[in-house]
């Protein structure tokens, strides 16, 4: 059995995973991000925005301050894909 990892190791691991995840989506073109994951399912841009919005929601939960992008909740969490009138572009999601 492996000993528990330190909190520093877990934070570094999480940061590396997030960087790889962001690198994957950042490499896609706008046309690729508009593709559905499967027929009739969410688009890749919505999935990326959903994950970014969930991560933004961690700030208040962890006591680190308010959400930086509260408008993303309606765009990517509370409404299904294509329900919101406007959503962030790929560049805006990348910055978030």
Image: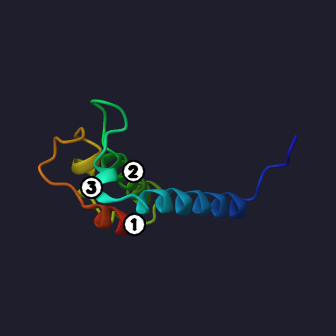
Q: Quadrant of the C terminus?
A: bottom left
Disc 3 secondary structure class: helix
Q: Are marks 2 and 3 in contact (CB under 8 Å)?
A: no
Which residue is at 63% across, 61% downward? 11
- As helix, strand or loop, the secondary structure at mark 2 comes to helix
How far separated are the C-alphas under marks 2 and 3?
A: 9 Å
Residue found at the far left of this picture: 85
Q: Looking at the rendered structure, which numbered label has been put on residue 54? A: 2
Give the left or right position of residue 76, taking residue 62 as reference.
Answer: left
Looking at the rendering, in which quadrant would you find the N terminus? top right
Residue 84 in the image, given as x and y percentages of width and height: 16, 46
**Number of the label disc, if any, that sits on residue 72:** 3
Foreground of the two, 38 or 49: 38
Q: Would you name the residue on which mark 1 appears? A: 65
Figure label count: 3
Distance from label 2 to label 1 (Cα)? Answer: 15 Å
- Farthest right residue? 1
User: Residue, x 11% and y 49% (percent of image)?
Assistant: 85
* Relative to 74, 90 lies left or right: right
């Amino acid at each position: 059995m492996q000993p528990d990892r330190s909190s520093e190791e877990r934070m570094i691991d999480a940061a590396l995973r997030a960087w790889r995840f962001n690198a994957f989506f950042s490499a896609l073109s706008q046309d690729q991000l508009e593709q559905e994951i499967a027929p009739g399912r969410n688009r890749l841009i919505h999935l990326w925005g959903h994950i970014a919005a969930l991560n933004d929601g961690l700030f208040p939960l962890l006591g680190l301050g308010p959400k930086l992008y509260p408008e993303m909740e309606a765009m990517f969490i509370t409404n299904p894909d294509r329900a919101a009138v406007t959503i962030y572009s790929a560049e805006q999601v990348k910055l978030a």
